[in-house]
Amino acid sequence: MSSRPLFLGIDLGTTNSTAAVFDGEEVTLVRNALGTALTPSVVRIDAAGRTTVGHKARRLLETDPANTRSEFKRLMGTSQALEFPAAKLTRRPEELAAEVLRSLRADVQQQLGVAPERAVISVPALFELPQSAATSEAARLAGFERVELIQEPVASAIAAGWRAGEDVGAWLVYDLGGGTFDASLLETREGLLRVVGHDGDNFLGGRDFDWSLVDRLLAELEAQQGVRISRADPAHAAALRQLKLAVEEAKIELSRAPEVPLLLPGLFRTGSGAVDLDTVLTREAVREACTPLVDRSVAVCLRLLKAHGLEPSQVSRLVLVGGPTQAPFVRERLAELLGVPFQEQLDPMTLVGQGAALYAGTAGLDARPAPKEAETGRALWLQYPAMTADPTPYVLGRLAEATGGAAPATVQLAREDGGWTSPPLPLSAEGAFAAPVELRVRQRSTFLVTGTGARGEPVALRPSRFSIVHGLTLSDPPLSRTLGVALADDRVRVYFERGTPLPSRRTFRHHTVQAVAKGAAGALVRIPIIQGEYELAHLCREVGVLEVRGDKLGATLSAGSPVELTLELDRGGRLSARALLPATGQVFEEVARLLVPDADPEALAELARGLRTRLARARQAAFRSAAAPTLALLASADEQLLDAERDAAAASGGDADAGQKARRTLLELEAALDALEAERMWPELEAEARADVAWCIDWVSSFGTPEEQQLLRDTVTAFERARTARQVAELQRQRRAVVRLGNAAFFRHPKAWEWMFEDAASRADDATDLPRAQALVSAGREALARKDAGRLRDVVGELRSLLPVDAQSQQLAHRSGLR
């Protein structure tokens, strides 16, 4: 086995996947059996159960579409089962992704002679937790022992910045893949890459470009030959697959030619005979059909820049990633609308894989199997960065145990190339040392570790060598979507705001809204963990759930019982949760893995009808008030609804991906209508928010720490910016931040809990358990007399938890059992 490390990065794409390895000095693309770095993300299973992956499978998409599957990435994390009728098998999307990963893993072994056990795999920046969990599961099924996930645009920026020198400034990564679009704003300073923020669309990519062209050709076919082929009709699925495949190939050819003939004899059969498609696809036709989609992506970029107070002119470079960005009209449109200079001499098809490999280097995630023969000698614990922008980083060391040989008196570090050697480093009384080392710029430096005894004799140490790479490093990655818990009144208890640096951990105390009897198998308290930017829980995606089940309880849990809930996210965004019940001392920490909800075509149609009614009412109100900006927004909403209705129809024809896209579009449209209705209530909302801010300023100025007072000033500035721009969602987000600071200061007042108790006691007659509420009021009076603030705080929490919850709101809020 080579002494060089092997850091493996994989871009698991919708259309194509690629792998790259980094040895500490160079990034190398992994080639498949055909000698190309791109492996189509296509899987075929034949009648004998044999699996074919990549180019061979893709060639069978047209001749054996029923047993060949592609574009399953957008279904990751759903319960959708994909059928292979010849073998009478079904496979989940992550099982198909595992076949692609297994194929890439075999390519690495073939090219480098090592079966990799660890890797970094890229995911879209806006992948939700179930989708990321499905990606990790696919890697496990493919034989990987450990994987870390990295957001695709971040990987692209690492690869772009690896040889970019010490440029300082803002970057915009425009990542348009086969199925998803991500825009990320990044900043480089002193060799550190920081993700400022990101935005995107999980249902915008080359696949949607293809369907836009297919719809155009179907309209042309109907106009010229009177033949209607519909995505809503399962009987037309074969013709649609053939047409889409032909369009995808023609679109690629148009990157090099102005027009491409498209001839599909016998595309469809009617009662009067076969129908042929014979036409010419031009660049201009592609431009007309797909420009609205490019404009949609640019709108995301502009929204991202605006959220961070930037104009396109303040961005120093635009990094293009993904196959669709090679189309001339895409680049022309980006230049026209953004005007940001492109980062040249980068391969948009493999940049993500290269960046993932470099990131594996920063994480020290060596893909090689552990050596069978371990080194001998006295064990030494070393701490150092695997990759750093600092040319002279510190290395810390300490003797790890008292076995394995004599202890050295000094340790010496020497760079393997002979260019640098440390002086002998004496060990402290605890057996520790610290010393800076000198790195070779933009290269891997390997250091030898030697020990010397008190009498000058050599002492063997393990490890006897280590390596550090000098290069661009990544700051803590930010959370892409806000994460919290759904409460029974359909509100959201936010745990981590979007942009929170990872890893992160937070704990809050909640109370149950119903009792759960010990031993009751069917009774439980449901704790839904949700992800999204909306104020109402039902608009956010449920991504995990903790259940406190009666058959696991050590004692009956009464209504209003406290629950201390902890949520934790690791650096890759993986979630863990822990619910502690102080009443019983029990801990529940098994988070049920949730799938992305199914998109039932009938339910989608019903939701669309309801939104159309709401749109009509909103339009009438806008006309009466002559609100031109609102009318423009409603026109855009109309287009969104039409798109969603078309996708819902395609879902009824068997296109599961279109169903998921329709579901997400309809939820976003529902949230947009909520925002419009909130906009009509702006004067009341603004007045309430300003009152909250004034209250908080008063309390923080009196009882806040200097750090809280500075944070309040910064938050109020952001609040005022959102208020001036009339941004409802951002105003509410900053309002929450201000109120948290105000509450922290308020509860430092010696009478705060007394005031809270009196307020709760005044509403005790409305409690769901009146005898219990009356007993708590008496207990609170006794605590007041004893000046027992701790007991008084508990009484207030229990009293408030006994106030009734609306059943309809609780059902909407993912059946939450907490308040």
Image: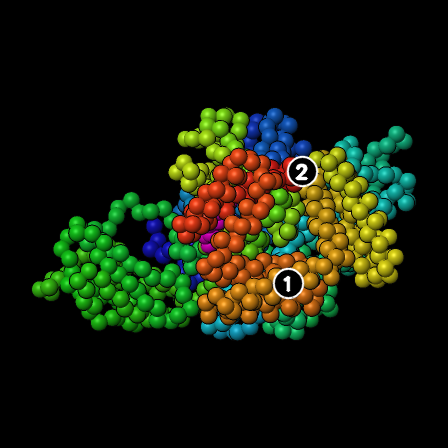
Q: Which residues are magenta?
A: 504-511
Task: Categorize mark 1 by other alpha carbons within 10 Å: few (<14), some (14-19), many (20+).
Answer: few
Q: Which is more toward the observer, 372 or 360? A: 360
Q: Which residue is mark 1?
A: 691
x, y percentage for residue 420? 28, 72
SS of the residue at dot 1?
helix
Locate residue 731 relative to residue 624 in the image: left or right: left
Three-letter residue code for mark 1: Ala
Cα–Cα gap, marks 1 and 2? 30 Å
x, y percentage for residue 563? 47, 42
Three-letter residue code for mark 2: Gln
Which of the labelled discs sits on residue 808, or is there none? 2
x, y percentage for residue 723? 67, 66
Of the 4 image quadrants, the one containing the C terminus is top right
The residue positioned farthest toward the left in the image shown = 455
* Residue at (47, 61) in percent of width and height: 749
Locate residue 249 relative to residue 124 in the image: left or right: right
Predominant secondary structure, magenta span? strand
Q: Which is more toward the observer, 575 or 703? A: 703
Task: Identify the image quadrant of residue 266.
Answer: top right
SS of the residue at dot 2?
helix
